[in-house]
């Protein structure tokens, strides 16, 4: 990649620097290939096999290097981000393009980073850093294990225990809604080394091998199929060298990991929404009723105009937040704003696209039906819409200046 970004340009769905535009085009090629291969293989292809299709294509294209810092074997991204971290703008550009084509391509891309970045944040162990380099090469598949039955948006509820035993820790507990169950080679696990559930302190992150004795998994189905399920830890021994970060500082590490990747959820939402808009335009232009194309009806034109405007706003909010994160700014409010608006908007745009397609829109296997299901979870994971609203309300209350004295209402 070049060290200096070319001049920004308009590429049809967002104004992006030329290097980001090139990344998006490269990701689009991969997404096209994944979409075509999965379409040819369905029906009957399971979610694990479908995931591996996406992973294999991303690996061959070298895109998985973008979710690992250059200092650990990932891609150099010039001025987009320092070598010790990953570029949110680069990842967002890829996620929007991949999501436009197929959710499984997007999922295989982001989970490669989300599950492994805690190593970059919290370890200097040569063996673990080599595993991280393996993630960049696509030779290893990670999984992030935070969520429990009693700990979702509030990670202080984590109850999984990690007891010290000589040079090891022994982990006991269960995780749920863990993406990459069934394909992961290792897990980055948040467990409690002290204190009780409900306490923010006392949590620690660990690197755990998939084949460790006492570790078990069980998959389950969700509305948009992908490898997901439960992780069981029954006295799993983990060497002290596999502690990520400081003992007791796992909450901060987990939140730092999520903070780096959360804005890319908005980018994926925008990719789904832009595909839904394109599907609506194509359908309304070719479908006729009462002797004329549906696209000639004023009410449907109003829909398209609003879909376009809201989507453009979502893309701009996402670009603003991604740039702020890459610049090292406190972008808490920008990220919350972009994640909230983009994910809620994607559900609305995809719903309108289903409506535009009529009966064909609810038929299993249609693109818009798939998009409708793919977008729903985005409003829940990595911080629900309600949590984003709480974050934003706190920001608004703190930073909104009082009106000038004597100003009119």
Image (cartoon, helix red, strand yellow):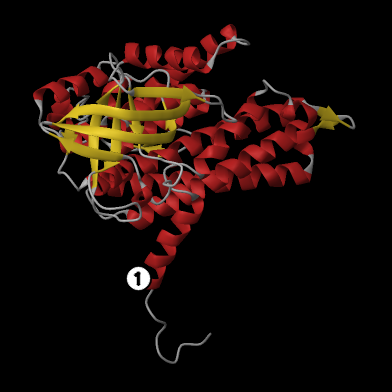
Determine if residue 4 is in view: no
Dot 1 surroundings within 10 Å: few (below 14), some, or many (20 or more)? few
In the image, 50 versus 293, the foreground residue is: 50
In the image, 130 versus 301, the foreground residue is: 130
Q: How many marks?
A: 1
The residue identified by callout 1 is 399
Determine if residue 407 is in view: yes
Quadrant occupied by the N terminus: top left
In the image, 233 versus 350, the foreground residue is: 233
Instruction: Residue 85: name its quadrant.
Output: top left
- 366 displayed left or right of 308: right
In this view, 329 is above or below 373: below
- 288 displayed left or right of 318: right
Residue drawn at point x = 30 percent, y = 56 percent:
199
Residue drawn at point x = 74 percent, y = 31 percent:
357
Residue 187, image x, y percentages: 30, 27
In the image, 123 versus 216, the foreground residue is: 216
Find numbered disc 1 in the image and state the secondary structure of the residue it sits on.
helix
Residue 87, image x, y percentages: 26, 36
Residue drawn at point x = 22 percent, y = 17 percent:
134
- 348 displayed left or right of 336: right
Instruction: Residue 140: name its quadrant.
Output: top left
Residue 107, image x, y percentages: 44, 27
In this view, 323 is above or below 108: below
Of all residues, the one furthest to the top in this rendering is 40
Residue 252, image x, y percentages: 24, 49
Residue drawn at point x = 42 percent, y = 43 percent:
382
Of all residues, the one furthest to the bottom in this rendering is 406
């Amino acid at each position: 990649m070049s060290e200096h970004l070319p001049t920004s340009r308009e590429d049809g769905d967002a104004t992006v620097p030329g290097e980001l535009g090139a990344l998006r085009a490269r990701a689009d090629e991969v997404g096209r290939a994944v979409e075509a291969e999965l379409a040819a293989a369905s029906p009957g292809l399971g979610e694990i096999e479908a995931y591996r299709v996406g992973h294999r294509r991303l690996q061959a294209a070298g895109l998985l290097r973008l979710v690992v810092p250059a200092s650990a074997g990932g891609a150099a991204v010039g001025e987009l981000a320092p070598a010790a971290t990953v570029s949110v703008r680069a990842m967002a550009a890829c996620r929007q393009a991949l999501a436009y084509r197929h959710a499984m391509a997007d999922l295989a891309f982001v989970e490669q980073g989300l599950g492994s970045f805690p190593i970059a944040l919290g370890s200097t162990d040569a063996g673990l850093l080599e595993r991280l380099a393996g993630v960049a090469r696509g030779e290893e598949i990670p999984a992030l294990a935070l969520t429990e039955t009693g700990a979702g948006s509030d990670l202080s509820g984590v109850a999984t225990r990690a007891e010290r035993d000589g040079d090891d820790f022994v982990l006991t507990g269960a995780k749920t809604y863990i993406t990459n169950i069934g394909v992961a080679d290792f897990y980055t696990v948040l467990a409690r080394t002290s204190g009780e559930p409900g306490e923010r302190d006392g949590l620690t992150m660990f690197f755990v091998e998939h084949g460790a004795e006492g570790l078990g998994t069980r998959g389950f189905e969700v509305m948009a199929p992908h490898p997901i399920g439960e992780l069981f830890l029954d006295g799993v021994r983990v060497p002290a060298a596999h502690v990520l970060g400081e003992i007791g500082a796992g909450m901060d590490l987990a939140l730092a990991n999520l903070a780096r990747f959360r804005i890319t959820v908005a980018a994926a939402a925008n990719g789904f929404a832009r595909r839904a808009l394109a599907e609506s335009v194509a359908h309304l232009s070719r479908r006729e009723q009462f002797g004329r194309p549906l696209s000639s009806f004023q009410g449907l034109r109003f829909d398209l105009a609003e879909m376009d405007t809201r989507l453009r706003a979502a893309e701009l909010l996402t670009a603003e937040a991604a740039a702020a994160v890459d610049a090292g700014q406190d972008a808490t409010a920008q990220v919350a704003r972009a994640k909230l608006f983009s994910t809620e908007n994607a559900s609305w745009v995809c719903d309108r696209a289903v409506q535009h397609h009529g009966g064909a829109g609810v038929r299993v296997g249609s693109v818009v039906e798939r998009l409708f299901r793919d977008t729903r979870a985005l409003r829940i994971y990595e911080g629900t819409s309600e949590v984003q609203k709480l974050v934003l309300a706190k920001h608004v209350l703190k930073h909104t200046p009082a009106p000038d004295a004597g100003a009119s209402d």
